[in-house]
Image (spheres, rainbow, N blue to C red):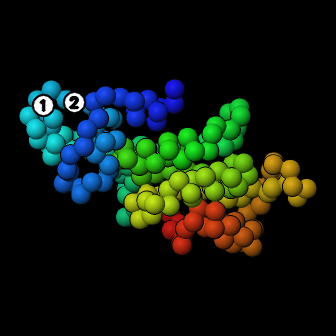
Amino acid sequence: MSPVREARRRSDAHACTHPSGGYPKPRILHQTFGRVPGVGHDNGNCETAWKEKTMQKRKLGNTNLEVSALGLGCMGMTFSYGPAPDKQEMISLLRAAVDRGITFFDTAEVYGPFNNEELVGEALAPFRGHVVIATKFGFKLDPTGKKAWVGLDSRPERIKQVAEGSLKRLKGEALRPF
């Protein structure tokens, strides 16, 4: 059973109001952290559980860009580790990661190629402004259309081409280099 389906099956899920205004979704929060003796649910104070169980954050480099201490690499969701998993399950998994506090996701145009960025863009579109998606460039894709890369290409015109393509696939509006 997939982790997402297992989380949905668990019986300790319940809904309540959090100081976050419902983000992350209460159901997922409680399935992730369960009932902690003496904290939150046992004494009816979900606010306490929320404060004690939030994801740690980190700043990237010398920027003000803040992300979750844990990130999620997305390559295996469409490419590389055997047959690609079911697309809807991967969308559910990405959204469940956000519900659990993950805000940093890694992809690249070369994963697939292209379809990993499309998957991540579709899954995370509802969370624009709450997540950071890292992507990479510099790969020279096979000009015959094969799903492979045949070298490196970091010329300025290629960087511009990749940035425009990635923004489209990721459903983004702007890049924030760091």
Which residue occupies 16% across, 42% down? 46
Alpha carbon separation for disc pair 1 and 2: 7 Å
Residue 60 placement, left or right of 86: left
Element type where label 1 sits in the image: helix
Mark 1 touches mark 2? (CB < 8 Å): yes
Which residue occupies 39% across, 60% down? 130
Residue 37 coordinates in the image, percent (x, y): 15, 26
Residue 123 placement, left or right of 147: left
Q: Which mark is residue 35?
A: 2
Residue type, mark 2 in image: Arg
| Crowd band around label 1 with a 10 angstrom C-alpha radius: few (<14), some (14–19), many (20+) | few
Which residue occupies 57% across, 53% down? 120
Place residue 138 in its image quadrant.
bottom right
Element type where label 2 sits in the image: loop
Residue 160 coordinates in the image, percent (x, y): 69, 72
- Closer to the camera, 155 or 25? 25
Residue 85 placement, left or right of 71: right
